[in-house]
Image (spheres, rainbow, N blue to C red):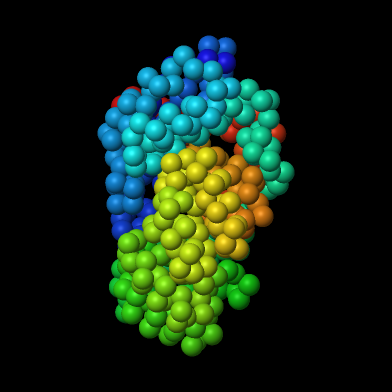
């Protein structure tokens, strides 16, 4: 199987409701899809969502990075896999979402050439997963309404977006908590919205009311490593790092400092599957469990994340892969089942992507 072409196109899809965090508001999905074709007719799909406020990438920068890497992939055998992955990472630094989109398509092809679903090729066996769902930030009453709706749909874990206003955040969390059944798991994500001092005060206030979230995600700025350590030493609520961890180097520093309880692995931050697997292994060395998350992205890259979750099921114990259920319509044909919070991987070789219904040219 020799790589014949690498193409890019846009995947657009409307959202059910706007996605709002302390960093941004998104009204519809617009992802870059990578399609790699081989000389035997096999097709591998990859995808990435440009998230300028987190990875610094745009559709334009992703296309440029992929065009720069493509000449090193053309004409090469898929079985020469390690060299392919080396080329994806070797010719440009950063640009992690672009690299992830390329890697996902290459892993799709490698698994197809092995006649195995990707998760089995990676050593996984678990095929059924449960994800949380994001409750976008907004007025408390609306957030409570969204939370109750999600629970009615069967979700048992909710990821509550907060962080725009420390004064409001405690009230919001307490109000949402008191409106829900006590067996619902609350995950809090402040998306860098607080200072370390505020984080301690707010979390202490919440804990004093008997509310224990499963974790607080990225309360402080991505580069405020000392802040994370300061918070971890002072509050009960476990601390999960998201924007602070892109690379293995980032993670190793935090793990060495014992500054966090969990790592949020996202393919768009690690540069794809190979480094996501390595990040899970590194976390395991330190006895730290992981969540696998996603940007606001489409079914191809989210599915790749589910395969990674299966491959490292002993370390990746939480899924935040709700992006597909936030879409108003599904632009991708897949044999993977997305039934609200329940995700079931198929036994088709590769990722399980059968085709894309509608792509837009760049
Ligand atoms: Mg996050």
Count of numbered labels shown in the rendering: 0
Residue at 68% across, 37% down? 120
Residue at 39% across, 41% down? 96
Residue 250 vertical placement versus 173 (above, below): above
- Which of the two residues, 42 or 228, is positioned nearer the viewer here? 228
Q: Which residue lies furthest to the right in this view?
A: 125
- Which of the two residues, 272 or 348, is positioned nearer the viewer here? 272
Question: Residue 227, percent across and down?
Answer: 36, 72
- Which of the two residues, 272 or 9, is positioned nearer the viewer here? 272
Q: Which residue lies furthest to the bottom in this view?
A: 208
Question: Residue 55, percent across and down?
Answer: 34, 48
Question: Residue 44, percent across and down?
Answer: 52, 25
Say whether residue 197 is left or right of residue 155. left
Residue 189 vertical placement versus 246 (above, below): below
Q: Can residue 106 be seen from the camera position used here?
A: no
Q: Which residue lies furthest to the left in this view?
A: 60
Residue 288 vertical placement versus 11 (above, below): below
Q: Can residue 88 be seen from the camera position used here?
A: yes
Q: Which corner quadrant holds the N terminus?
A: top right
Q: Which corner quadrant holds the C terminus?
A: top left
Q: Residue furthest top?
A: 39
Question: Residue 185, percent across and down?
Answer: 58, 69
Residue at 58% across, 22% down? 79
Residue at 66% across, 25% down? 114
């Amino acid at each position: 199987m020799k790589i014949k072409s690498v193409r890019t196109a846009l995947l657009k899809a409307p959202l059910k409701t706007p996605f709002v965090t302390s960093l941004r508001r998104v009204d519809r999905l617009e992802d870059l899809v990578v399609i790699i074709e081989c000389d035997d007719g096999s097709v591998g799909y990859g995808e990435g969502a440009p998230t300028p406020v987190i990875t610094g990438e745009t559709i334009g920068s992703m296309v440029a990075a992929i065009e720069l890497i493509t000449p090193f992939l053309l004409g090469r055998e898929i079985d020469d896999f390690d060299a392919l992955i080396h080329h994806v990472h070797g010719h440009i630094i950063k640009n992690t979402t672009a690299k992830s989109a390329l890697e996902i398509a290459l892993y799709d092809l490698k698994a197809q050439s092995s006649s195995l679903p990707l998760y089995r090729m990676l050593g996984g066996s678990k095929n059924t997963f449960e994800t949380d769902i994001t409750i976008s930030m907004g007025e408390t009453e609306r957030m409570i309404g969204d939370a109750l709706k999600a629970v009615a749909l069967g979700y048992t874990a909710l990821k509550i977006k907060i962080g725009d206003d420390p004064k409001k955040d405690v009230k919001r969390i307490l109000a949402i908590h008191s409106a829900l059944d006590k067996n619902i798991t609350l995950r809090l994500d402040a998306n860098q919205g607080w200072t370390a001092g505020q984080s301690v005060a707010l979390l202490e206030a919440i804990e004093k009311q008997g509310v224990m979230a499963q974790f607080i995600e990225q309360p402080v700025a991505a580069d405020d490593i000392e802040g994370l350590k300061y918070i971890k030493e002072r509050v009960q609520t476990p601390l999960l790092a998201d924007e602070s961890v892109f690379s293995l180097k980032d993670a190793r520093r935090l793990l060495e400092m014992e500054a966090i309880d969990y790592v949020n692995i996202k393919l768009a931050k690690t540069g794809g599957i190979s480094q996501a697997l390595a990040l899970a292994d590194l976390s395991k060395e330190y006895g730290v469990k992981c969540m696998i998350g996603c940007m606001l992205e489409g079914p191809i890259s989210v599915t790749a994340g589910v395969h990674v979750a299966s491959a490292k099921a002993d370390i990746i114990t939480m899924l935040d892969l709700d992006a597909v259920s936030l879409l108003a319509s599904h632009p991708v044909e897949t044999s993977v089942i997305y039934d609200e919070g329940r995700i079931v991987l198929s036994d088709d070789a590769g990722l399980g992507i059968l085709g894309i219904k509608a792509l837009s040219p760049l």
